[in-house]
Image (tube, rainbow, N blue to C red):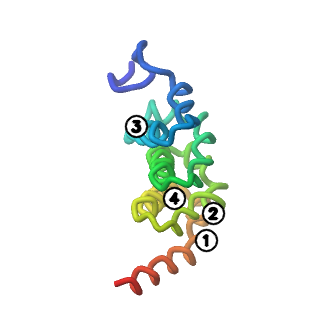
Amino acid sequence: QGNKDSLLCNDSAPSVRELFDLLKHKDAVVVRYASFGIARLCDNHRENQDAYTVELHRVLPLLEHKEDEVARNAALILGCACNGHKINQDFLTPHINSKLSLLLERDDVMAVGNAALTLANACDGHAANKIEVAATFPRITALLTKGSQDT
């Protein structure tokens, strides 16, 4: 019994794999819109979060994409996918400091905001991720210091 908005219950909808295939498209505009849509489809939607679990590894390279909007949407996908989802939170654990926290150093305010939101969702009720996020505090402190110097 699926929610009518579920990707899994609509026979004419693309599969999760087909959606994630769009993340490899050569046109950054396609990647930008696809990544935003993918994120929105699993925001507060458990069935779609479950369906995304096996595809999340495909999002990681986008965190380092040269286009800010693609990188920020990649963080948004991860943030929505791990919001209250233990398995997806577990997936993020080894990537918090190696990939995700690097977005905190971008000049794009939205990328920084999405990274911060994703870090918060990753550690909500997850002890191992809290330890990983604590290791990002020097980056966060530097960001706050930079922000106060800019004003």
Query: Which label was assigned to residue 123?
Result: 4
Kindly identify the amino acid type of the residue bearing the numbered disc 2.
Asn
Query: Which label was assigned to residue 37?
Result: 3
Q: Position of residue 11 (x, y in %)?
A: 43, 12
Kindly identify the amino acid type of the residue bearing the numbered disc 4.
Cys
**Badge 2 is on which residue?**
97
- In three-dimensional space, the C-alpha distance between marks 4 and 2, rounded to whole angstroms, equals 13 Å
Asked if the residues shown at circle 1 and circle 2 are in contact, with their CB atoms under 8 angstroms apart, the answer is yes
Q: Nearer the viewer, mark 2 or mark 3?
A: 3
Q: Nearer the viewer, mark 3 or mark 4?
A: 3
Q: Residues within 10 Å of mark 1 (few under 14, many from 20)?
A: some
Kindly identify the amino acid type of the residue bearing the numbered disc 3.
Gly
Name the N-terminal-most of marks 4 and 1. 4
- In three-dimensional space, the C-alpha distance between marks 3 and 4, rounded to whole angstroms, equals 24 Å
Name which residue lies at 41% across and 80% down: 147
| Quarter of the N terminus within the rendering | top left
Asked if the residues shown at circle 1 and circle 3 are in contact, with their CB atoms under 8 angstroms apart, the answer is no
Residue situated in front as seen by the camera: 130 or 98 = 98
Q: Quadrant of residue 45?
A: top left
- In three-dimensional space, the C-alpha distance between marks 4 and 1, rounded to whole angstroms, equals 12 Å
Name which residue lies at 64% across and 55% down: 95
Query: Which label was assigned to residue 135?
Result: 1
